[in-house]
Image (spheres, grey):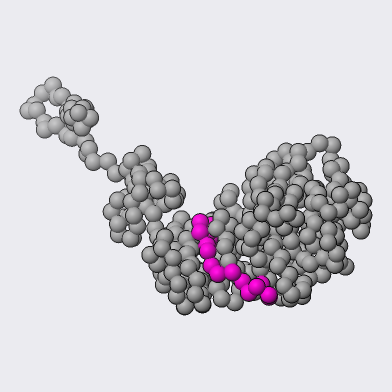
Amino acid sequence: MLMKILLLISITCGMKIEKEGPPKKPKFLNLITWVKFDNTECAATSGDNGTCFTSNECSEIGGTADGTCASGFGVCCVLQYNCGSKTNYNSTYFLNNNYPSTFDTIGQCSISVEKVSTDVCQLRLDFDEMDLSQPDPVTHQCTSDRFVVTGGAPVPIICGRNSGQHMYIDAGSGNSPTSLTFITTGSFARAFKMKISQIECGAVNRGVEGCLQYHTGVSGTISSFNYMDAEGLQLSNQEYSVCVRHERGFCGISYTACQDPLHTISESFSISKPTSEGMVMVGDTTCTTDWISIPCATTSTAGSAIQASGSTPGTCVERVCGEIFCSVTNHPSPSKHCPIYSFVRPFAVRVHLDANEEDEGTPANNRGFCLQYVQQPCTSY
């Protein structure tokens, strides 16, 4: 019906009536319309993310049409790659062969990620599922399984269970590809699925440079790799920063240790072996092997503090370690975690875990950390 209406309109508009002479043939408008749309990210019906392509384009690049986009003119094309692949498309997935089935083989599985354009500055890796073998029980080093990133700035090697975690990777200069590799040895039922997003240099979702993890929102949760609800082991040889985007109208941030329903004594903050049970450990002379650094960490909510030993709420420290998350040594409840505040922007937590957990005793069994953050609104400070 619509085509017919357009046709009639075209005939009427295309005719020109002459007063004299023989009638001229009517001119018809071209009714073929080409619909153009951007190859933007879209939500597939399966819950994965894809890229909007035409049906033919999706088929040609080996994708799977999973829903529609561009007002029905395109399909949400989900791109999934296995071992030995390469990709230069945005919003793609890298997963083990025969996923969601596990695999138990010795070898390596890698993908080469090429930039979709020269304006790409970062890759974001979202680990929908990452279940590798645990680190060595004594050294906490990733000796059996490991996930390795090469290309761009150095990235710590991780292993264990990291489903739900993410990384921002420096894409490097020029057109050099980034390699993502899983190296596996020993017997273990492994599985992985990660989403790879390419982020342009001027994009609003670009992470802060130097931050391996970048969180947004007024509140949220951050945790070390392989935390596993306080059941995993802290990984050795970790050096990176976790950053939280400063939201408008907020001038500070608070960090609180997560709840630990699995242990009588909370292990949601466990990154150093204290010399005595329930001891708060702060400062660069005490925290020398494993620690996290929060700029001017304080228990004061006043919005300002003096850099000192951390013995009172009005003073602040940079390093916190041990098994009690607190920035003061004379807290009224020294065996319990306490909230830590920071009013230094940008909001960041630097993680430093040395190369060998044997430094903390044998076995140390440190779990890592899990912290809940809430940004603090601006008042008079």
Image coords of residue 222 (percent x, y) = 66, 53
- Which residue is at the front of the view, 161 or 79? 161
Residue 137 included in the magenta stretch of the image: yes
Please state the extent of the stretch shown in magenta in the rendering: 116-140
Apparent side of residue 211 relative to residue 297 in the rendered image (left or right): left
Relative to residue 285, is residue 127 depicted above or below? above
Apparent side of residue 62 relative to residue 197 in the rendered image (left or right): left
> Residue placed at 91% from the left, 53% from the top?
330
> Residue placed at 35% from the left, 45% from the top?
67
**Can the viewer see residue 32?**
yes
Relative to residue 40, is residue 156 depicted above or below? below
Residue 217 included in the magenta stretch of the image: no
Image coords of residue 265 (percent x, y) = 75, 55
> Residue placed at 43% from the left, 69% from the top?
103
| Displayed quadrant of residue 218 | top right
Specify the quadrant that holds the C terminus: top right
Image coords of residue 180 (percent x, y) = 51, 69
Name the residue at the left extreme.
22
Name the residue at the front extreme.
264
Image coords of residue 220 (percent x, y) = 65, 47
